[in-house]
Image (tube, rainbow, N blue to C red):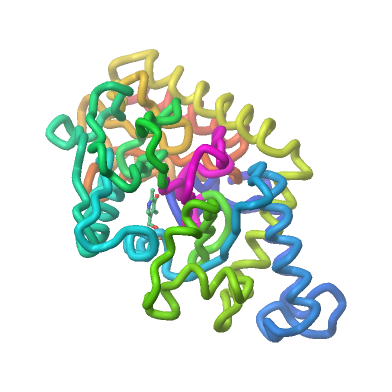
Amino acid sequence: MDGNGRIHNFGAGPAGLPLEVIREVSDSLPNLNESGFGLLEISHRSEVFQKVIDEARESVRRVLSIPEEYKILFLQGGASLQFYMTALNILREGEKADYLITGGWSKKALKEASRIGDAKNIWSDETNGFRKVPKDGEYDIRDDAVYVHYTSNNTLYGTQYHHLPSSSGKPLVVDASSDITGVEIDVSKHDIVYAGAQKNLGPSGITLVILSPWAISRIGNDIPTMLDYNVHIEKGSMFNTPNTFGIFVLGRVFAWLEKNGGMKEAIRRNKEKSDLLYKELDRTDFWQPHAAIESRSKMNVTWRLNDTSLEEIFLKEAFDCGLGGLKGHRSVGGIRASLYNYISKESVIELVRFMKKFEEAHG
Ligand SMILES: *Cc1c(COP(=O)(O)O)cnc(C)c1O
């Protein structure tokens, strides 16, 4: 437990959130910002809520250093809807888009884009179990591709780009769901950035979408209203009733990040946490880390036990020690520790201490 009766929550999402944020949410439930209206009970058309969404947007812009001319949207439907919506807005029938396939989420993105145009898998590590991300020069981008899509961090397999992948000058679209605010991202070098909030940014049911002027200029006509980025831009993400609760929480998470040193500190914390865990994983071959060293994720650390029959016992004993959410994704198995914003260095130290004890007892 983390000292507040809360488990050390290493779950991949919906994930733990900073306790300070949870307390702010809890205080706002009966009465939001002394408006007399509870957080779940206030009109999105009220001035009080308008202020909440405006502040959230400004905080997102500051923390992620988003250029002024980029638009920030808070949408529903998760990152999964963005797989389709990105292509629907910026790709036309018969046009080409190139996809780097580094895990289950990229495959799903490709599948949805294929409904719109000629979306192509230009690199994949699937036959090798998705252990790495491509290096520049390992794939060819088609001359007439409209954009290149990649998944910055592979939540299921625990791999991550540590460089901006080359797109040969083409616009870049990124699914940053599981590492946004955890690692460096240069928004100005992307044309669409999207991220489901429930990993690093807040609760489920809200998706952050960032659009460049180029992406906005590409938006087609005749797009169904709710799927049309222009509608959401014009209406300030409030064409219909938005996820008011989610927007509030996301705003508080960004405010928490600003109070705690912004991206610079968030990146430092995540490096420190992941270094601690990988050091233990490399200490003994009792553990078998999944990702190739150069592609290791700082957000989702995945490994098997050399004796896989011990994995169930590992998970059970870890849980009994207050370490939860460690079960690997069902498509991969094994163990996965997600190190999002909420997870402190102390939680990782607890995990490593438990791992050493476990190895002594079973190794
Ligand atoms: C979790 C996740 C998704 C799916 O997000 P939903 O909000 O559930 O649609 C997509 N991409 C990545 C990289 C993820 O980690």
- Residue 324 visible in image: no
Residue 293 falls in image quadrant: top left
Main secondary structure type of the part rendered in magenta? loop
Give the residue displayed 57% in from the left and 77% down from the top: 242
Q: Residue furthest right?
A: 34
> Which part of the image, by quadrant, shows the C terminus?
top left
Residue 352, image x, y percentages: 49, 27
The front one of 123 and 248 is 123
Residue 94, image x, y percentages: 20, 58
The front one of 143 and 254 is 143
Give the left or right position of residue 254, taking residue 232 as reference: right
Specify the quarter for ligand 1: bottom left
Residue 233, image x, y percentages: 58, 69
Residue 183 falls in image quadrant: top right
Residue 79, image x, y percentages: 41, 59
Q: Is residue 195 magenta?
A: yes
The front one of 126 and 170 is 170
The front one of 45 and 265 is 45
Q: Which residues are magenta?
A: 174-199
Q: How many marks?
A: 0
Give the residue displayed 24% in from the left and 23% down from the top: 138
Q: Residue furthest left?
A: 127
Q: Is residue 161 magenta?
A: no
Q: Is residue 294 above or below residue 321?
A: above
Give the residue displayed 38% in from the left and 26% down from the top: 296
Give the left or right position of residue 176, taking residue 183 as reference: left
- Residue 55 visible in image: yes
Give the residue displayed 70% in from the left and 68% down from the top: 53
Q: Is residue 123 above or below residue 237?
A: above
Residue 237 falls in image quadrant: bottom right
